[in-house]
Amino acid sequence: MEIKENICLVEKQDTNLFIHLQGDVIIQNAKYFYECLDSITIEDIKKITLDFSKIKNYDTFLYLFTIRLEKLCRANNLAFEKLGLRMDMQDFLNVLAAKKTKEEELAFTMNPLIAQISSIGSGFVRVIKDFYEFTAFGGELFLHFLKLLIHPRSIRWEDFPFLFMRVGVSALFIVLLIVFLIGIISGYQGAIQLKEFGADIYIADLVGISITRELSPLMAAIIVAGRSGSAFAAEIGTMRVSEEIEALRSMGFNIFEFIVMPRVLAVMLALPLLVLLADVAGIFGGMIAAITTLDISVISYLNQLQKALTYEHIFTGVGKSVVFGFLIATAGCFRGLQVSGGAESVGKYTTASVVMSILLIIISDAIFTFLFQALGI
């Protein structure tokens, strides 16, 4: 394209001003067009006509020049007319004008107050949508559980031992350590209060019941959610990104039976065993706090624990852990299957799986608390 100066001609006819664009209206020639525009005097002018008929080549500068001239006319209350505009030029200007309009609308919605209100509404809609999709996902998973009772070989059992070991054995040390420390903390805190009333021996009741019914299943579930739930979301999300999920579907594999069910069963069976072992660790931690803080012996602690702690307390916590395991694995697989795009999406939904799992654990634990109280358990 040739760059030259005589590409913008100005002609005045009575109260009309004609601007003839010629040759190449491109960014390289911008200074000549702007010089032409700056040389215009609008005294006694009522209308400006922009002539496009002699344009050979153009780029986005044509749109910029037109917009600038339109603003000049609006600022001075002048009529503006386009002459000789070809169809291709009109389509080109319309596309850029539509983009400009969208940017202006976006800038308008970025007003802080409007943006805040919009984000609240969008967040609420997202929560409702996620709840609906998660409920549908859980319902489909439940149907596959019913199918499993009739056809036990319908799922991929080959992955189950590996998943069970990874969820259970790999998490054993950290779960025992955390619940052991929780037992020590609960024992020390309880001992301080009980000592004031001379009820030292009841430290066994406090630690034993609180650990087995609440603290052990709750802490074990949260740890497993952070380890295994996030791992499931990341693994399945990566499979989505690399299109392995679509490949398995195209080969006729059922994703629930091949990927989801083995993980859900592994967590549901491993978590209760973790909770039972964590109960022992937590009670042992409480015993250490009791014998070092209060004037009671190991035998006295164990005798009182035997009187206070029943199978009802133990299996209440174990039963809750089965439900917690189902929710953790379901949330991890659900978020993993929502991944789309690349690594950023994997990270986003992995984080979302942990948050969702912990939220579901706390909500279900609260429901169990009210339910057990109503049933007198």
Image (cartoon, helix red, strand yellow):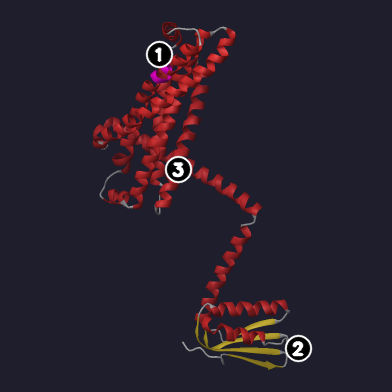
Give above or below for 19 relative to 231. below
| Distance between mark 3 and mark 1 Cα atoms | 37 Å
Q: SS at mark 2?
A: loop
Q: SS at mark 3?
A: helix
Q: Please tell me which residue is depicted at 43% across the width and 20% down the height of the picture.
A: 282
Q: For this view, does 99 lie left or right of residue 216?
A: right
| Distance between mark 3 and mark 2 Cα atoms | 67 Å
Crowd rating for badge 3 (residues with CA inside 10 Å; few <14, some 14–19, many 20+): some
What type is the residue that disc 3 sits on? Thr
Q: Nearer the viewer, residue 107 or 171?
A: 171
Residue stretch in magenta:
280-284
Answer with mark 3 or mark 2, whichever residue precedes in sequence: 2
Task: Verify whether residue 283 appears in magenta.
Answer: yes
Task: Verify whether residue 256 appears in magenta.
Answer: no
Q: Nearer the viewer, residue 150 or 126?
A: 126
Q: Please tell me which residue is depicted at 31% across the width and 34% down the height of the picture.
A: 166
What type is the residue that disc 1 sits on? Tyr
Q: Which residue is mark 3?
A: 351
